[in-house]
Amino acid sequence: MSEAPQPTLAIEARGLTKRFRRGTTEKLAVDGVDLRVEAGRIFGLIGPNGAGKSTLVSMIATLMRPTAGEAWVMGHNVVREARQARMSLSLNASAGERGFYWRLNGYQNLEFFAALQGLNAGATRDRVLTALERVGLNRDVKLRFGEFSSGMKRRLNVARALLVDRPIYLFDEPTTGIDPHSAMVIRNILRQLKGAGKTVVLVTHNMEEATELCDEVGMLYAGRLIRQDTPEVLRRHVPSSEIEVELRSLADSEVVTERLRSLSVVESVVPYGEGRLRVRTPSPEDDVRGLLLWAATGEQPVAGISVVRPELTDAFVRLVEEATGERPAPIAVSERGSPVAARIAHP
Amino acid sequence: MSTAVSFPPRQSARSWLRGLAFQARIFVKRGFIHNSSYRLNFSLSIVNILIGLVSYYFLSKIARADKLGEFGQNPAGFIIVGTTFTTFVSVALASYAGSIRSEMFLGTIEHWLLSASSLTRLVTLSTVWEFLWPMITTVITFTVLVAVLGVHFNVDWWTTVVFFLLTVVTMSGFGLISAGIIMVSKIGDPLSAAWGAVNSLLIGSLFPITVLPGWMQAISHALPNFHALNGIRAGLLQHASLASEAHELLVVLAFCVAVVPLGILCFRAGFERARAQGTLAQF
């Protein structure tokens, strides 16, 4: 018998392993994962396709029995106390075009799934209407699921997860391949759930989304949990290599480029989008102060200067390389470097 | 942080029944919306059932009364009861596995599994619509046969209802075994296919088993459906009491007691196997 789970954790896994066997072939989908998800936080699970994210979530959700290891959901063992574990969470499975009844409309679909949760007729109606309103589908309730757009289908999927009040919500790629508005609606719901004290596990390919939403991120690669930490700490594993200079006017590009090139610390200057320059220096974290001083005292036509922070995807590549010796392809969406330094105060 | 999860308090029998009725209503609503949305198919299925049963009526006109034994005076009733019985047996056998297969295909099975209700309960409820629809068509058909075509029934309701329910429950046990197989195999259910063949040949649905060779008759006597059909025929056509059909009743009851728990066990075993293999949501 293993040690009891830690009471402060919403989800805990120790050595969780899933091995699939088909005839003589065998695939290790999840390889001895140790996971700790604090209650009341948004935890991101990132990794490329086939990394084992969905398999890990399925085991946590009791839909799949682990080959080895143990996991607890709100202190309930996912094998020995599967029902209690199951009743502690709500799963927004990666459904895509599946997972609903195509001939039923949005309301009827949710009404059906609410009834499965043992709600009575009155509670079912209230919960369904509230969930539809939260995802912004209350005016489309009479459309059949088959007539929904991809974004609406995803939002309905999220609405289904909201039908029940549980301490943990698992979202498996809820915003993949949908329009920005639907993605924004879903992200806001994740924030609201966190605000209400719920624990959210977000499986995503979207590094920008993970950086923006998650308090902590677990990086999964080839079934192994490579590292688990806050996005900030993970990003610090990759040193900054550039400084971004924001120009006051497009017309200033040439003159500022020339003046920057004249500085001894500057190795190169390249244009980077409209009204921005990327400056490479030996040590951007240290050199940014000198440039700020240069811009402020020399009355340069510059609006802002910042160190370009590496993206989460860079950290992912670096950490996987360190852990496995393999260099993975950078995954999915990345954001432009986020400025972190000051804007230049001009008189 | 509290690790306690609040479970609903233990329900009274009344609220449990109310919850069950609500879920059954929702399943029927889903079945009706789904089926009626395919309007042409829906209309054709009504026409087909009526045409089928009326055809059997005319077929019964050429049936030889001397071969039908105790039902010789009512060949139409004999054949119509037999075919209707076969319909319900087929539904009971196929609807459980069909439901599982359909939910796997649609990708909804994992939401069933994560619900507050047990999978066995939900799969059973999903068959309510499957039974309800043939029940409605049967009532319409029998009404037409009696009122328009003059087919005679001499019904003992108790006997009919008891044998009907026992048959449905017993066959549902076999249906659950099929569903357990489907959970793992995904497609291809040998049990339903075998039962279908046995039903049409050996239980006497279209002809009395006395026309079969002796060894086949022996097999017939070992089948629960043969005894159940005898009981229902006696109840519907001869106003037979339950007491007079006690032998048939005991045989069907014995099968029921043995098969239903076995069905639940097989279904759970199939579920656990698919969960271990990680193929629950696959099709």
Image: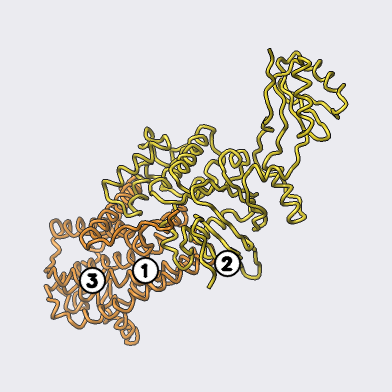
Q: Give the colour chain B carries in the figure.
A: orange
Same chain, labels 2 and 3: no
Q: Residues within 10 Å of mark 3 (few under 14, many from 20)?
A: some
Mark in the foreground, 1 or 3: 1
Comparing marks 2 and 1, which lies closer to the viewer? Answer: 2
Asked whether residue B191 is in view, the answer is yes
Circle 1 residue: B175
Label 2, residues with CA under 10 Å away: few <14, some 14-19, many ≥20: some
Q: B259 or A121: nearer the eye?
A: A121
Q: What colour is chain A? A: yellow
Q: Secondary structure at mark 3?
A: loop
> Which type of secondary structure does the marked residue at label 2 adopt?
strand
Q: Which residue is mark 2?
A: A69
Q: Quadrant of residue A139?
A: top left
Taking A313 as reference, is A307 above or below it? above
Task: State the image coordinates of residue B244 (x, y, percent, origin top left).
Answer: 13, 80
Q: Mark 2 near mark 3, Cβ–Cβ under 8 Å?
A: no
Numbered label attached to residue A103: none
Going by the numbered disc 2, the residue's amino acid type is Gly
Q: Chain of mark 1?
A: B
Q: Is residue A104 above or below residue A56?
A: above
Q: x%, y% of residue A232?
A: 65, 42
How packed mark 1 is, by other alpha carbons closer than 10 Å (few <14, some 14-19, many 20 or more), is: many
Which mark is nearer the camera, 2 or 3? 2
How many numbered marks, from 0 up? 3
Residue B13, percent across and down?
A: 22, 63
The residue pinned by badge 3 equals: B63
N-terminal of the two: label 1 or label 3?
3
Q: Which amino acid lies under the numbered mark 1 shown in the image of this protein?
A: Gly
Q: Is residue A204 left or right of residue A298?
A: left
Q: Nearer the viewer, residue B4 or A154?
A: B4
